[in-house]
C-alpha cells in the first residue's frame, strides 16, 4: 500500500492525520497509515530520496514552492494550479507510475467560499471584480488563482514586507490580473466585497483593525487556529460573512484523499464515487474537534 504523511514546519498542529485517517476508515482502507513529519525546506529532497515508501504526501509551509522547484528538476508532472501558483501541496508517487505534483488549495478556497454562499442562498456574489488579498506567501498564490476563478480582475495585495511580494506579483501577471501592492497596516475591513487572507493565525490584531460600524461582503481566512478567532468574531459581529480555513482544509483534503485512496488500492472509479463519503468523514472530524 505504501505510506502517507503530511510534511511541514511547524507541523504539530496539523489536522491532516485525523482527516485522512477518518476518510480511509470510511471507505474501508483498514491498513491505511498517515503520519505527521516535521520537515524544513532544506531536508525535503533528501527525505524523498531516502524514503520511497512514502507514496502520497501532503505538504504545507514552507515546502510548497520547493516542491514545484523539485518537480522541474526531476521532470515530474505538475498540474495547472501548481504551475500557476508556483506551489504544490500534494505529491503522488505511485510505484512504477509518473510522479505528480498537485495544488488542491485553489479548489479548497473556491469550494469553501461557494459552499458558504450556497448555505446562505445568495443569488449573486457579494463582491465586484475587485478583491483584497492579505499576505504574499505560497498560499497567496492559491488565493490569487481562486480570486480569478471567482470573477476578480483587480486585487490589492496587502503585505507585511513589500520586498517579498515578487512571487505574488508574478502570479498576478500570469493570470492577466492587475494589482496594487499596499502595506498591511493600511487594510480596512470591508473596503472590498471579497477579502482573502493568507496570513498566519494571529497576524491580524482584532483590537487594532479600523472597523466600520457595519460590514458587508465576505472574508475568507486560510487560518483555522484558535488565535484567528478574535478577528473572525469581530468581523462577523459587524455583518461580514466569515469563512475560516477549516473549510478550505476540508475541501482541499477531499481532493487529496481521492487520489491517495487510489494509491492505497481503490480503483479510480471507486475512489471518485467515494468522494461524498470522504467529505462527510472529514467534515465530522472538523465539527467535533
Image: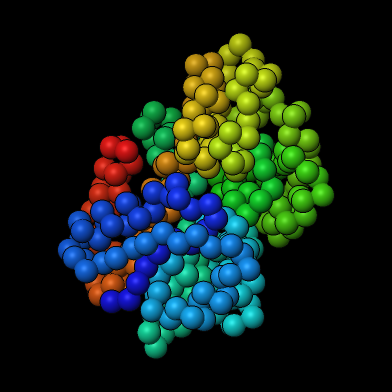
**Going by the picture, which residue comes out furthest to the bottom?**
96
Is residue 259 at least partly visible in the picture? no
Residue 118: quadrant of the picture: top left
Residue 196 appears left or right of 24: right
| 158 is higher (above) or lower (below) than 81 | above
x then y, percent, for residue 183: 78, 35
x then y, percent, for residue 71: 59, 76
Residue 107 appears left or right of 186: left
**Going by the picture, which residue comes out furthest to the right?**
163
Task: Identify the residue at horizontal 58%, vertical 70% (top origin).
Answer: 43
Task: Identify the residue at horizontal 48%, vertical 37% (top origin).
Answer: 225
Is residue 143 at least partly visible in the picture? yes
Image quarter (top left, top right, bottom left or bottom right) of the C terminus: top left
Task: Identify the residue at horizontal 75%, vertical 29% (top origin).
Answer: 185
Q: Which color mode does the image show?
A: rainbow
x then y, percent, for residue 203: 63, 35
| 127 is higher (above) or lower (below) than 1 | above
Amino acid at each position: 500500500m505504501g505510506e502517507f504523511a503530511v510534511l511541514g514546519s511547524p507541523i504539530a498542529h496539523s489536522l491532516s492525520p485525523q482527516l485522512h485517517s477518518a476518510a480511509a476508515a470510511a471507505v474501508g482502507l483498514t491498513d491505511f497509515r498517515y503520519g505527521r513529519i516535521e520537515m524544513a525546506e532544506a531536508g525535503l529532497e533528501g527525505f524523498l530520496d531516502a524514503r520511497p515508501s512514502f507514496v502520497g504526501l501532503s505538504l504545507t509551509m514552507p515546502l510548497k514552492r520547493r516542491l514545484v522547484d523539485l518537480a522541474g528538476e526531476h521532470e515530474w508532472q505538475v498540474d495547472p494550479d501548481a504551475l500557476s501558483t508556483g506551489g504544490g501541496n500534494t505529491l503522488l508517487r505511485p510505484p512504477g507510475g509518473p510522479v505528480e505534483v498537485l495544488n488542491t488549495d485553489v479548489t479548497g478556497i473556491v469550494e469553501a467560499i461557494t459552499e458558504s454562499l450556497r448555505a446562505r442562498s445568495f443569488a449573486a456574489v457579494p463582491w465586484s471584480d475587485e478583491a483584497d488579498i492579505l499576505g504574499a506567501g505560497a498560499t497567496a498564490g492559491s488565493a490569487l488563482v481562486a480570486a480569478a476563478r471567482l470573477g476578480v480582475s483587480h486585487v490589492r495585495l496587502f503585505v507585511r514586507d513589500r520586498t517579498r511580494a515578487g512571487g505574488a506579483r508574478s502570479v498576478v501577471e500570469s493570470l492577466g490580473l492587475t494589482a496594487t501592492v499596499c502595506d498591511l497596516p493600511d487594510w480596512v475591513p470591508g473596503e472590498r466585497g471579497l477579502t482573502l487572507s493568507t496570513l498566519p493565525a494571529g497576524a491580524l490584531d482584532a483590537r487594532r483593525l479600523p472597523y466600520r460600524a457595519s460590514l458587508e461582503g465576505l472574508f475568507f481566512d486560510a487560518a483555522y487556529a484558535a488565535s484567528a478567532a478574535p478577528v473572525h468574531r469581530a468581523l462577523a459581529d459587524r455583518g461580514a460573512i466569515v469563512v475560516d480555513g477549516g473549510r478550505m482544509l476540508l475541501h482541499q483534503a477531499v481532493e487529496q484523499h481521492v487520489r491517495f485512496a487510489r494509491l492505497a488500492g481503490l480503483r479510480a472509479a471507486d475512489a471518485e464515487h467515494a468522494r461524498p463519503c470522504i467529505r462527510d468523514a472529514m467534515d465530522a472530524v472538523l465539527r467535533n474537534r
